[in-house]
Amino acid sequence: MLLEARGMNKRFPGVVALDDVSISVRAGEVHGLVGENGAGKSTLLKIVSGLYSPDDGELVWNGESVSFKGPPDAVKLGIELIPQELDLAFNLSAAENIMMGYYPSRLGRVRWREVNRQAREVAASVRLTADVRRKCANLSPAEQRLVMIARALARNARLLIMDEPTVALTEVEVDALKAVVRDLRRNGVTVIYVSHRLDEVLELTDRVTVMKDGKVISTDPTAGVSKTQLIERIIGRPYGEQFPERQEPQSDQPVLSARNVSGGFVRDVSFDLRPGEILGLAGLVGSGRSEVVRMVFGADLRDEGEIEVDGKPVRIRHPRHAIRHGLSLLPEDRRGQGAIVNMSIAANVSLPTVRRFAMRGTGMIHERAEGRAVRERIGQFNVETPSVRRPLKFLSGGNQQKALIAKWDMSESRVFVFDEPTAGVDVGAKQEIYSRIAKLAQGGAGVIVISSELEEVVGLCHRVLVMREGRCVGELKGDAISEAAILELCYAA
């Protein structure tokens, strides 16, 4: 065993994050770690990487008991955590990031030619073909993640912890990253692979551990476990139908129409959205699908195009105009653009409707009324929290996402736009989000869903528009919607 965690306990105020957790990782294996958001995975990995200290328990590395005062102690042993949210100096080059802290120098001066040469060697070992002299800000998300893996290898990493490594990557980029993981295993690097994409876990890992409610439920050879068995262990109940039954739209009169929307590299995109309809926008990352809805919502400026709500032209040049006309947008970057994570859950959920709770003539918020309304709304979405006054950042990813959907649900919008609604969300929370999206449509709202997970698009949507290079290149309806048909349009010449 390369790493063993024995009897780990960790408590936070009002929460038992780890309850007598024991796990072992063999040298040279890819070990899957799965579970719902809040199951304790992140807490365990932060202990292993030196970010947290356990309340009880022992950490054993290569047969010897160890304790860490901080992440540098773990790095010295060869333990590297690659988090879901990339930790890079984006204004520096890929080479500077890869060699950070290990710049070759002479007489106190950095030898930049040698920095670039060594960085190229390490980059080649992880199949990073981009010029290492380019700034990280100008690399694709997949290339940025490869830079982080290369940086870990430059520090002689023996154990790589990869947390949701394929979030926001295209299918092609996902396949490339899988190849890198296989290369790491062949070269003797041990990997702990954390992902909510269970197909990836089953394909890549040698063994898989399931956690739930701060406890280890099982550890098994991956070859002996099915996807259904994993899901049932993760959610703690029999696994039923993943997607809710679709109901037909309630009217042919569009609730939202976009005509010849153009801006940036997006050109002449038009569509109608009917009440009760779930419309999918599919395409590769960078195809323009997010840019279109951001222009419709007023979050990005458009050069041309008209927007109609209930058949009437409206002026939307700012998100507040969109909200006023009954539109809502949950953006792909929920932490950076969809929430104020240091503010309370109540403040985030009530943000679009905060005037409803203003005390007349004072400019102050009636906190009791706000809290009551928010508790009722997040209760409908099964958001788990001891208090609505806790900062949003202390919720798990799935609960954050459900809280932000509750925010827009409380605004009683006519049109809901969800960009990557289940990114980084566990299978149990996914089902709840799918059910909520279906209920919004059944209540008469129009819903637009953007997702890189084609299974979601196929399972949820009545119609799908496929984007490529800033243009709409096809429309699929009903039984014609399939993953193969979407990909054919994505890659068509």
Image: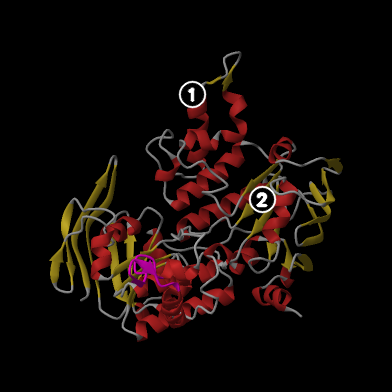
Q: Quadrant of the N terminus?
A: bottom left
Mark 2: amino acid: Val
Where residue 99 sits in the image (x, y, percent)?
39, 70
**Which residue is tagged 1?**
367
Q: Is residue 122 above or below residue 8?
A: below
Report whether 462 appears left or right of 76: right
Position of residue 186 measured from the top left corner of the image (x, y, whole percent): 36, 86
- Do the residues under discs 1 and 2 have CB atoms within 8 angstroms? no
Is residue 340 left or right of 319 when viewed as pictured?
Answer: left
Q: Residue furthest bottom?
A: 186
Judge the density around disc 1: few (<14), some (14-19), many (≥20) Cα neighbours within 10 Å: some
Identify the residue at horizontal 46%, vertical 79% (top origin).
120
Front residue of 21/73: it is: 73
Q: Is residue 221 above or below residue 162?
A: below
The amino acid type, in three-letter code, at marker 1 is: Glu
Q: Quadrant of residue 118?
A: bottom left
The magenta segment is 99-112
